């Protein structure tokens, strides 16, 4: 369908626990992006993929964050040993290709670290 | 690194008044996109501007890209309550690279 599907909608983790978020891009879209939105407004780019290959990971905190986009599977963003400051809404977006400007965002996953 | 600044942070208007949000980049952009995010929602793509000095209109919304491709604006004529939300600009300095978002302008419209 014409929708980026993110699961779960809400995730609560105790500090130090692992969190894993999933994103199914729109079928046929080759570019996938992850953004972190903290405090309602501030969007921070994390990582982008072209198909299953990392395209740009300059926004990823190296130590605890990892992400994958494997064939025939939803993309995933994993946070090891979560910290309070990881609490945010994580948005995934997909685009058809590099020449198509329109990005479709998922509904987001709200991660709360307590 | 690239910075994208957006002003104002908040704007409260009476229904029927106009609204403008401004976006400024520290570097020259290859393109700029505008998104709208309703409260509790996700960003929805509005438009992309590519050419220097470009102006595009969508009904009551007018988007401009500066001549130097470092600034942009979104103007809404005669706001309606359905216009409420946060408007973000997102600038790219490469065609296939990441977009850097501004901090958004949150618009509230009083009926």
Image: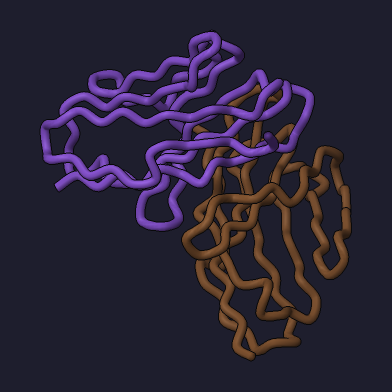
**Residue name at image x 82 percent, y 38 percent:** B50
**A77 displayed left or right of B50:** left
Chain coloured brown in the rendered structure: B
Q: Is residue A8 above or below residue B12?
A: above
**A49 displayed left or right of B59:** left
Residue A15 % position (x, y): 12, 38
Residue B75 % position (x, y): 76, 67
Q: Is residue B101 above or below residue B40?
A: above
- Colour of chain A, in one word, is purple
**Residue name at image x 56 percent, y 68 percent:** B8
Q: Quadrant of the N terminus of chain A?
A: top right
**Residue name at image x 52 percent, y 72 percent:** B10
Q: Quadrant of residue A77?
A: top left
What sort of colour scheme is used for the picture?
Answer: by chain
- State the residue in front, B23 or A10: A10
Q: How many marks?
A: 0
Q: Is residue A113 above or below residue A92?
A: below
- State the residue in front, B70 or B42: B42
**B88 displayed left or right of A9:** right
Residue at the front extreme? A1
Residue A67 % position (x, y): 39, 19
**Residue name at image x 25 percent, y 31 percent:** A19
Residue A83 % position (x, y): 17, 37
**A114 displayed left or right of A6:** left
């Amino acid at each position: 369908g014409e929708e980026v599907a993110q699961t779960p909608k809400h995730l609560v983790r105790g500090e130090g626990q692992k969190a894993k978020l999933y994103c199914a891009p729109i079928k046929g879209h080759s570019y996938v992006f992850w953004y972190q939105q903290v405090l309602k407004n501030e969007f921070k780019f994390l990582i982008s993929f072209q198909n299953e290959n990392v395209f740009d990971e300059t926004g990823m905190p190296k130590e605890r964050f990892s992400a994958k986009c494997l064939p025939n599977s939803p993309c995933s963003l994993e946070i090891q040993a979560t910290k309070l400051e990881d609490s945010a809404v994580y948005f995934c977006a997909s685009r058809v290709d590099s020449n198509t400007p329109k990005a479709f965002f998922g509904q987001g996953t709200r991660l709360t670290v307590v | 690194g690239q910075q994208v600044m957006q002003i104002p942070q908040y704007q409260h208007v009476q229904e029927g008044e106009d609204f403008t949000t401004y976006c400024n980049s520290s570097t020259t952009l290859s393109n700029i996109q505008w998104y709208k995010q309703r409260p509790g929602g996700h960003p929805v793509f509005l438009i992309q501007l590519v050419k220097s000095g470009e102006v595009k209109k969508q009904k009551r919304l007018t988007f401009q890209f500066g001549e130097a491709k470092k600034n942009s604006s979104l103007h809404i004529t005669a706001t309606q309550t359905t216009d409420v939300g946060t408007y973000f600009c997102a600038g790219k300095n490469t065609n296939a690279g990441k977009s850097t978002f501004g901090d958004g302008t949150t618009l509230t419209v009083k009926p």
